């Protein structure tokens, strides 16, 4: 066995036999020491098992945390994309609404210009009609006045001839 492959268990320590020599170690002291070594080895193996279980638990937790982190990162990326898309859509809608409003405003302005032109044309026509009416009325009045003056002259001329 190489050093890397050698595994010592508490049972190995408890069952280990040593050859006896003439002036060997005190058997009771060796047995006591073997017992203490075996007990310590058992404690260390239990502690190792507990630590391995905790390590496995921590690795599982780390894996779960990494999965959550990835999910949150994915959600954050998706939320950012959604925000970007919503902002782009809102800008697009605003641009459309502005263009539509400009078109409506241009139509309204064009109708107002046409109405203004029509009103000016109607006003000019009404002014011409008024001027024509005044001229016509003046001519009528002048004819009537001339007739009245003629009637007065005739009345005067006839009145002087009457005795």
Image (cartoon, grey):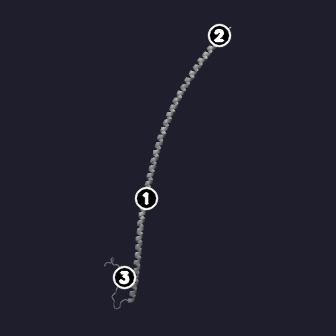
Q: Quadrant of the N terminus?
A: bottom left
Left or right: residue 94 versus residue 12 is: right
Check disc 2: other Cα within 10 Å, few if <14, some if 14-19, many if 20+: few
Q: Residue at x 41, y 73 (%)?
A: 53
Tell whether 128 sits left or right of 78: right
Q: Toward which corner of the image does residue 79 lie, by quadrant? A: bottom left
Q: Which mark is residue 158?
A: 2
**Badge 3 local density, few (<14 within 10 Å), some, or many (20+)?**
few
Q: Nearer the viewer, mark 2 or mark 1?
A: 2
In the rendering, at what x and y percent does residue 69 appear?
43, 62
Q: Residue at x 39, y 82 (%)?
A: 38
Residue 98 vs 126, above or below: the answer is below
Secondary structure found at label 2: helix
Q: Earlier in the sequence, mark 3 or mark 1?
A: 3
Q: Quadrant of residue 36?
A: bottom left
Name the residue rendered at 41%, 74% in the picture: 51
Q: Nearer the viewer, residue 102 or 20?
A: 102
Tell me the CA gap for discs 2 and 1: 119 Å
Q: CA distance from mark 2 to mark 3?
A: 173 Å
Q: Residue furthest right?
A: 163
- Please tell me whether residue 86 is drawn above or below residue 124 in the rendered image: below
Q: Earlier in the sequence, mark 2 or mark 3?
A: 3
Looking at the rendered structure, the secondary structure element under dot 1 is helix
Identified at 49% across, 33% down, the residue is 114
Relative to 2, is 153 above or below? above
Q: Position of residue 139 (x, y in %)?
A: 57, 19
Relative to 105, is 69 above or below? below
Q: Residues within 10 Å of mark 1 (few under 14, many from 20)?
A: few
Q: Which residue is mark 3?
A: 11
> Would you name the residue on which mark 1 appears?
75
Of marks 2 and 1, which one's residue comes earlier in the chain?
A: 1
């Amino acid at each position: 066995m190489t050093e890397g492959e050698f595994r010592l268990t508490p049972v190995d320590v408890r069952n280990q036999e040593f050859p006896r020599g003439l002036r060997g170690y005190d058997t009771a002291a060796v047995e006591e020491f073997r017992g203490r070594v075996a007990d310590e080895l058992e404690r260390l193996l239990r502690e190792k098992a507990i630590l391995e279980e905790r390590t496995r638990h921590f690795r599982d937790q780390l894996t779960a945390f990494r999965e959550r982190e990835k999910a949150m990162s994915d959600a954050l990326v998706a939320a950012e994309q959604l925000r970007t898309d919503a902002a782009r859509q809102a800008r697009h809608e605003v641009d459309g609404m502005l263009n539509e409003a400009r078109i409506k405003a241009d139509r309204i302005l064009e109708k107002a210009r046409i109405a203004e032109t029509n009103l000016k044309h109607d006003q000019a026509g009404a002014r011409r009609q008024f001027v024509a009416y005044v001229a016509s009325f003046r001519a009528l009045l002048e004819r009537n006045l001339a007739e009245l003056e003629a009637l007065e002259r005739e009345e005067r001329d006839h009145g002087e001839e009457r005795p």
